[in-house]
Structures are given as structure tokens and as C-alpha cells.
Image: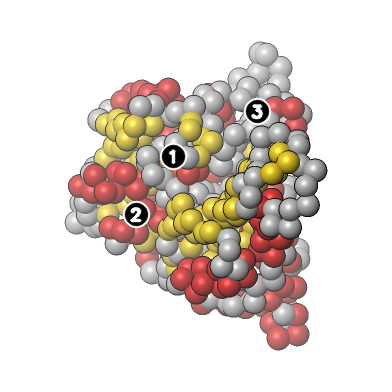
Amino acid sequence: MPANESLEATASIARDLIRFDTSNYGDGRSEGETDAAEYVEAHLRRMGLEPVLFDAAPGRTSVVARVEGRDRSKPALVLHGHLDVVPADAASWSVDPFAGEVRDGMLWGRGAVDMKNMDAMMIGALDDILGSGRRPERDLVIAFFADEENGGIFGAHWLVDNHPHLFAGATEAISEVGGYSTMIGEQRAYLLQTGEKALVWVRLVARGPAAHGSRLIRDNAVTRLAEAVAVLGRREWPIRLTDTTSQLLGEVARILGASPQSLGPDELALATGSASGFIQATLRTTTNPTRLSAGYKHNVIPDRAEATIDIRTLPGEEDAVLDEVRRLVGDDIGIQVTHRDVGLENPFSGDLVDAVKATIERHDPGAPVLPYLLSGGTDNKALSKLGIAGYGFAPLRLPADLDFPAMFHGVDERVPLDALVFGRRVLNDLLLSY
């Protein structure tokens, strides 16, 4: 954008956050969130709040503050985001992933979608409310977590385990990967994330004899690992519809004027437009290979080969899927569970859901709100240990041709500037009314 053209405040905060490289490589390796956390802390203090910084490990900083509501008899609401991002290979991007460039009416950079956009919308909505001398309807717990991209070990899970008092009185939470718009036929609709799949990260380990690369070795660890990886990566898991997905597909069929029986789950999922990138994966378990590691020289057959598999099961199916994975790869492949977390499914009903529907109706009249199960996971998993029901509602009105799910962990991540303004206004309205 031209140098003399000012950037709207929400986009400016999001751009600032993108410029902090908070890349999380997993397994405890990270650029750290401390600088970004201190930036957020300064904004919250400017609003008159008393945020507290928590370091679960050096550089792994989360920020939490409490906002007093008008009606303190109501349960508190947790409004949370995360400050870390997945790494970005600059060579694959059209822009510097950590420059926060504005181009073509969009803010580009790692975190523009996942989820520094929502972090900025949270700050902006709070600033609008508190800066005008008002208060949210109920107490808010505002949290910006570290380490979400590695399962929250140094973030949400650590805070829930070590400082549960921070969330005292809270019964519900709002965070990422919901509230965005998609096109179903000619109808714009908003997807409220009411649940998410369970997470099981495993490491496959194959062993065999080390040998010269010229020898005939039928028990080659790399070969055996590759066979196991291929079996899991190509596995077609059966379709099973949870209550949430059944509700969603029923509504999609209604909007299209079709019968769920005539189209079938996959066709109805595809009819959700760009959102199908998430929704198709919620019809079944997925077992995606993500990393391979073996060997140290071209002419040496290694005695060990490893692969990581990202398993996402439907809620409650974790043990059964692990048993099937063991059967598929065979007894001679070791399986190490490196991280595991629960699946969630919350009702698409109640006062919060009604408030979300009413708020969207005020800002985009005639656009329905539909429930959906997220194929990934959020920090709502950690909060569920405290009995807090987490929903995904980071409201964005998006262009019909923007493949929003592809932006998550993808190349050239970007978000429309006007969508950030929309989200700030919607969150402001919701926090004042609910």
C-alpha cells in the first residue's frame, strides 16, 4: 500500500504480530513467543488491565488478563488466541513471510490466518469496549497462549495444569478456526466450530542390520519403514458421521434443496465451498505421514529409520484407531505415541450459540450459522480439562474465491483487510451482548 496511506488499527496490530518470528518447530524447538507476548501485554496495560506473563520454559511466554463484566453473576467467558506459528520456507513464498506486507487489499504473512489475525481482533474489540468506558456483559479471561502448534505443552496445557485458578468461574471459551464464511451454492454461511477431532501423534521406528550399501539386505529398515508409511498414508478410513457433522450436512442439503441420501456425505462436504478442505477430513479418521528420517551416508544401509504420522480420529475413537494402526504396520514396526489429546464435541445449542447467531444476523443479515467439526485441534482441548466448553469463532466475512482452509500452514498465507474490520466489529458486539 502507498506509504502515506494509514492502516486500520486491527490490521496494524496483526502486521506487528506477524513481524515477530514466533516459529514453532515442535519437540520443544521454537523461536519463542516472549517478544510477541510483551507486545500484547503493553496493549492490555494501555487499556487499564493487569495482564500477567507466564513462562513455561525460557522464551515460551503466555499472557493472561481478566476483564470485569457488567453482570458478574454470569459465568466467565475465555477469549483466547495463540502467539506461535508454524515455520515458513521463505523460498516458497511470494513475499517475506515475516514482513507483514499489505498487497491487493490483504495482509500477507505467517500467522495472518493462524492466528495472529484473531489475536489482533481480540485486542481491537477489547479496545473499542474499554476505550469507550463500557464493559463486556460478563467477566472475560483474555489469554494469548504459547506453543499451540506443538499441542500446548508449554502453553495452554501448562497453564491449565499449573495455574487453573486463572480460569475460575469460566464455563465456555471462544477461539480460532470457526466463524468464517463460506459459500454453499449461492448462499453465504458462517461455520461455528463446535468440536474438533482427537489428536494422536506417533513415531514409527523400523530396525534392521547396518550394512554396506552394495549388499543384498532384505531386512532393510528404510524399506520396511517406507512400506508401513505407504500403508497408513493410503489408508481409506471408513466414513462415520458424528452428531455435529450430521447436523451440518443436513443444513447443507436444506440450503441446496437436496436430499442428504441422494448426494451422500462426500458430495455434501464438497458443496461447502472452500470450507470442504476442513470438512471432508471430519467424515473419517486420517493418518498422514509428515516426516521421514534415516541414514547418514549414501552407501551405508542404516540400522534405524523413523517416520512421524499425524493421526486425527473422531472423538472417542483414539484407542480403536491405534489398535488398527498397529495391525496395519505389523509387529516389527515400533510405535511411539509422542503426543495425544482429546476430541471435542459441544452442542450447537444454548445461549452462546444463540448469541453468535444473533450477532452474525446483525452484521450479515440472512446468512445462516452452521455447526462443524474441525479436522485439526485448538487450545480448547486443554481448557476442556477444566470443564470449559470451547467453540471456534474468529469471525471473518471472506471473498467467495478465497480458499481459506488452504491458508492454514500453507504458502502465501493472507487475510483480507476488510475481513479483519468485520471480525473486530462482530467480536465487539458479541462481547457486549453475551
Percent position (x, y) of residue 362?
A: 52, 55
Q: Is residue 340 visible?
A: yes
Label 2 sits on residue: 383
Can you tell which quarter of the image residue 417 is in? top right
Residue sticking out furthest to the top: 4
Closer to the camera, 297 or 71? Answer: 297
- Please name the residue that numbered disc 3 is placed on: 97
Q: Compared with residue 92, is residue 188 higher up or lower down, i.e. above or below? A: below
Of helix, strand and loop, which one carries label 2? helix
Relative side of 302 to 386, left or right: right
Quadrant into which the N terminus falls = top right
Report the Cα–Cα distance between label 3 and label 2: 30 Å
Q: Which-is-in-front pick, marks 3 and 1?
A: 1
> Which residue is label 1 attached to?
147
Image side of residue 370 versus residue 267, left or right:
left
Q: Is residue 203 left or right of residue 342?
A: right
Q: Nearer the viewer, mark 1 or mark 2?
A: 1
